[in-house]
Amino acid sequence: MTASLAALSPVGHRVAPTLSASVSASETASRELVGVRGVTKTFGAGVSSFNALEGVSVSIKRNEFFTLLGPSGCGKTTLLRLLAGFDQPTSGQILLDGDDIAGLPPNKRPVNTVFQSYALFPHLTVEQNVEFGLVQQGVQREARQRTVERMLQLVRLDHIAKRKPNQLSGGQQQRVALARALAPQPRILLLDEPLSALDFKLRRGMQVELERIQRETGISFVLVTHDQEEALSMSDRIAVMDAGRILQVGNSTEIYERPNCRFVADFIGEANLFPGSAVGWVSPYVAVRPERVVLAIHKQSMPISLPGTVKEISYLGATTAFTIELTDGSVVKSQRNDAPQGLDSGSTVWCSVHPEHIIELEG
Amino acid sequence: MMLAPAQNLSQRQRRRALALVAPALLMIGVFMLVPMGIAMVYSFLTPDSFGGVAPPVTVESYIRFFFDRDLDDTLRFDPTYLQIFWRSIFQAVLTTLACIVIAVPFAWYMATRGETTRKILVLLVSIPFWTNMLVRTYCWVLLLRDEGLINMGLQAVGITQQPITFLYSDAAILIGLIYASLPFMILPVYGTLEKVDFRVVEAAFDLYASRISILRKVIFPLAMPGIAAGTLLVFIPTLGAFLQPDILGGGKKLMIGSLIQQQFTSSRDWAFGSALAVILMAAVLASLIWAALKRERMEQLG
């Protein structure tokens, strides 16, 4: 139903992003905005060449907060640079609204970037920084001033419009970079580890801000990060990447509750990994989250209940983390708040898991 | 009562600060103010018959700069020296502009290379300093003369049949001046651009700027402090240059530097030479103050 509505609506094809969030999410969300189709990016040549991306395909929807998550060197920044136009794919297509934009330079794409180091123009004021893209687009002076004012209000910096970047704190610079990239109203906003330079508290605040701004502008955000907590808390959908490939795409719950491989299970949160055969399972590997490992003094009536010795205990406030060595020598982590009282290093405990908490992994 | 100790302290601090800047002040005093003072004093004296200066005190040297004294002792306005001044300023402006045009892209290229390449390029730019300027200027004679390398090359390739006369022209002087000044523009501009985060260029490119806009709106303003420093380092020495006009220009057209040099050597008129130097200094100082004021006003406006 929603798909047919979007197809019928004349505005559904080219919805201008607005600040009033008037874009109906249900009308457009089903439509693909960006299509990455079998993209490979090779750096270098001959023996020293290496593939930063290998046959990556992913689809980013309208009005979506999409995150590329992975360790450094996984290819997430390369993919972002391909979307921005700073690099060209070696093979494959990048579609925006169905048109291949792989050959377009950055200044011809309705895509803007928030850089990791912010890259503000040091010789321009906050206002002039935000105005830059609009000037280059040839927007009239009055319209420009209105947009700049609105953008600075959006990021709550209207009181320091006349300052230069070197007079701002890291968090303020971050907001200017955001306002500057949003001002030309791009179809997609790319964010390259935008919060990594901020301290913990500021980062939390900015995460909430980013979510708010994404909702208010209705622009699709593509965030690159190596911080899984950040990814889980902010994103509509996450693509987990490793070694130039996308391993899994899904929303936060899917990625955390149902990882499809050892890498995702281990990278997102903590996981106890076993070969399937070790716990009598058919899949090649299984994972169990530490908060799903129940500790007890006696054997439990669960299909999996194994004895072990407590090696380490760390009290974390809300929960306590245990490291337990099973009789076969493998190590299990448990993190709960209902462990038996009086456990100590060297105590014998039974580690038990409900079958529905066993995550089957294919590889 | 309460203020007294604080005042003492600040006075002591002031004395200490004065002691700390004293060496710098002494250097400026001995090596800048004293020579300038001597030139100033000489310019108001009369040349004596042995090539030095002697009383009486007179403004004759300054009058000579603007006027010609007829046989009947009447003063007639004579623009000869002013024309020499004007020619020199024109040459210096051209040289400075040419240096900016060449140096900014060059310095940008240098600043965006890897660290090793950057070090090699800085070394290459500074290598000419290892050889005496006189020798290097004569090398340009060897290159530019009718039987020189450039003409031989052009004829060997068949582009020209007859040698082109490059030497002893304004163009030859200009080439020599640009060649001599270029490192003084490249190095400060490079020093400024080296500190620039290259990502601002990507940011501008991302924000719909064309390549020309990036150069005009981002790279050029960021290079501005270096260009300003380079302009001082190029413009002032070029204004007083005499090697290139003499050797490459054949001394046919007098430049202010050659004129002053002549007064102290062949003409043995130290008073007039000093007066010329003082006028030149005043002109440079005035233009610097004007530029500084203009810049201040520009900054206030926007």
Image (tube, rainbow, N blue to C red):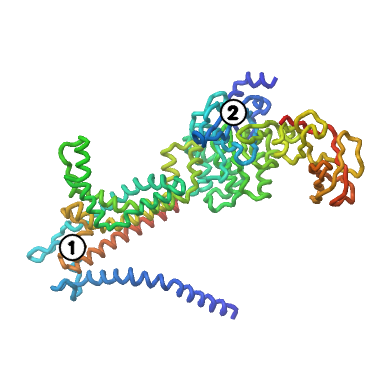
Q: Residue furthest left?
A: B71
Please tell me how crowded label 2 is: few (under 14), some (14-19), or many (20+) other residues with Cα within 10 Å.
Answer: some
**Residue at image point 52% right, 46% down:** A120
Q: Residue furthest bottom?
A: B1
Q: Position of residue B107 (x, y in %)?
A: 40, 48
Observer-nearest of B268 and B56: B268
Q: Position of residue A287 (x, y in %)?
A: 77, 36
The residues bearing labels 2 and 1 have C-alpha atoms spaced at a distance of 76 Å
> Where is mark 1, residue-wise?
B262
**Image height of A176 relative to A65, above or below:** below
- Picture quadrant of residue B269: bottom left
Residue B219 disc label? none
> Where is mark 2, residue-wise?
A55
**Left or right of A194, for residue B282:** left
- Which secondary structure lies at badge 1? helix
**Residue at image point 19% right, 46% down:** B148
**Left or right of B66, for residue A329:** right
Q: Position of residue B178 (x, y in %)?
A: 29, 50
**Chain identity of mark 2:** A
> Quick check: can you spot residue A12?
yes
Please tell me how crowded label 1 is: few (under 14), some (14-19), or many (20+) other residues with Cα within 10 Å.
Answer: some
**Left or right of A348, for residue B9:** left
Residue contact between numbered discs 2 and 1, judged by CB atoms under 8 Å:
no
**Left or right of A196, for residue B215:** left
- Which secondary structure lies at badge 2? strand
Question: Disc 2 residue type?
Answer: Gly
